Image: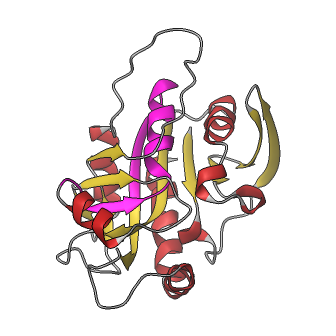
Amino acid sequence: MLGIIGGTSLLFTRLPDLETRVVYTPFGNSEVLCGEYALLMRHQRNKPPHRINFRSHLAALALCGVTHLVSIGSAGTLKQEIPEGSVVIPSDYMSMAPIPSFHDHAIRHVLPEFSPGLSRQLAALIPEARHGGIYVQTPGPRLETRAEVRALAAGADLVGMTVASEATLARELGMEIAALCTVDNYAHGIADESPTYEHLLKRSEECKDRTGDMVKRIIAGLA
């Protein structure tokens, strides 16, 4: 079963009609829109990135029967050659923030990476996306300083606050996962204009039709 996680980039997108289901897990409860696929909005109850209950969200998707997952996230670009407005399917990730885990009471080591096969399928469905690059997760909720951006840009291409946590937990649960990042701003210091949350919202609204079209293609190709 296909699962899709969305956030800021889907705020203004018209989504298909699905049944709303509250899924109770050992880690809390999460709201999932269910049908032939499952859709979960990560910022439920207006939670900022550092307060999202990632374990509840991923457990809820697993309980709904999700086997392969596409995480759609808004990201900032760390490289001028990846301009604002781009769409990127990253090939790997790293994190500067603590990553949650389901393995609290036993030693488990899971190879956490985006699934190459699913990423290739996603790239075929979204051919306008750049395929490849490194996503780095920061804690949030604040944006990164210029000094942090310079350091992060040495090893990564995109910066966000959610996808690495979701990818790690998905792999712990045995799900295949790929990410689709909409580049909604230049990270601090990459361009003349400093990023703001209001700018991210404006960019999301401007791109709502494009984002909606990509979601439709993902559902048609992977559900």
Give me the residue at 44% from left, 30% from top: 171
Magenta-span inclusion, residue 84: no
Asked if residue 191 is positioned above or below residue 162 in the image, the reply reads below
Residue 102 image-quadrant placement: top right
Give me the residue at 33% from left, 36% from top: 113
Frontmost residue, 78 versus 128:
78
- Residue at the extreme top: 106
Is residue 98 visible in the rendered image? The answer is yes
Frontmost residue, 65 versus 188:
188
Residue 185 image-quadrant placement: bottom left
Frontmost residue, 138 versus 42:
138
Residue 214 % position (x, y): 45, 68
Asked if residue 117 is positioned above or below residue 219 in the image, the reply reads above
Q: Which residues are magenta?
A: 155-180
Asked if residue 162 is positioned above or below residue 12 in the image, the reply reads above
Residue 218 % position (x, y): 46, 57
In the image, 163: left or right of 39?
left
Q: How many circles with numbers are drawn on the protein?
A: 0
Asked if residue 163 is positioned above or below residue 76 in the image, the reply reads above
Q: Quadrant of the N terminus?
A: top right
In the image, 32: left or right of 197?
right
Is residue 174 visible in the rendered image? The answer is no
- Residue at the extreme front: 147
Residue 94 % position (x, y): 32, 44
Give me the residue at 52% from left, 56% from top: 219
In the image, 141: left or right of 189?
right
Residue 72 % position (x, y): 48, 58
Task: State the scheme by which the image is colored.
Answer: secondary structure
- Residue at the extreme bottom: 192
In the image, 101: left or right of 117?
right
